[in-house]
Image: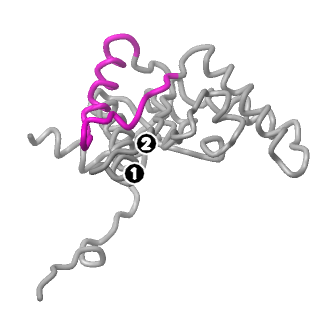
Amino acid sequence: MTAMIDILATRRSVKPDRLAEPAPTGAELDRILTVAARVPDHKKLVPWRFVVFEGEARVAAGEVFAEACAAEEKEPPSAFRLETERNRFQRAPLVVAVVSRVTLRPGAPEWEQILSAGAACFNLCLAANALGYGTSWLTEWIAYSPIVRARFGLAENERIVGFVHIGTPKEKPEERDRPNLEAIVTRWSE
C-alpha cells in the first residue's frame, strides 16, 4: 500500500519532448492498457477505447496534423508551423489516444461516461508511472480538429479526451506548487 500512495503523492507529468526511448511495448503495454481500462464504468458500457501510435504510425499521424493545420487555420501556416505539426507525435516514443464513446442509456448519464474516459486517461498515466515511465496527458488543438477526427475514424458519439505521451524521462521533473488543502476543502454541516 505504501508504494501505491507514494506513486500517487509524487507523480508528475513529463513534457513530451522530455520523454525518450524506451517506451513500453508488448506485454508491458498490454498491462498498462488493461489497468487503464479498469475504471468505474456504470452499466458496463465501456465508454472509451484506445488508439496506439508507435513507430511509423506517429509519422503518419503527423502528416494528418499538418494537413488539418493547413486546411483549418485562417491564415496559411508557416513552413515552421507545418513541420511542428508533422513532428507533434515524434516528441515521445509512444502516444495513446483515449477516445470517449457515449452511448445513450437510461441510468448512465453522458457526464458519467465522459468521466469514465477521463479516469481511463489517468489510470493509463498511473500504470505507466508505476512501471517507471513518464507520461503527459494532453489534448491540444488536434483533439478538436474535424479533419483529425475524421481521419482517425471517430464516430459522431466519440471525442478524444486525451493523448497520453509515454516514454522514459530524460530527467526527473521538478516539483511544482500544489493546492493548499485549506483553500480547497470545506466541511459541510447544516
Q: What residue is pinned by disc 2?
A: 102
Q: What residue sits 25% from the left and 44% below the top? A: 42
Q: Quadrant of the C terminus?
A: bottom left
Residue found farthest to the top:
26
Q: What residue sits 49% from the left and 41% below the top? A: 162
The amino acid at mark 1 is Glu
Position of residue 130 measured from the top left corner of the image (x, y, whole percent): 27, 32
Q: What element carries label 2?
A: loop
Lateral position of residue 69 relative to residue 45, left or right? right
Q: What residue is pinned by disc 1?
A: 110
Q: Quadrant of the N terminus?
A: top left
Which stretch appears magenta? 25-52
Q: Residues within 10 Å of mark 1 (few under 14, many from 20)?
A: some
Position of residue 143 measured from the top left corner of the image (x, y, whole percent): 60, 42
Residue found farthest to the bottom:
190
Residue 82 highlighted magenta (yes or no): no
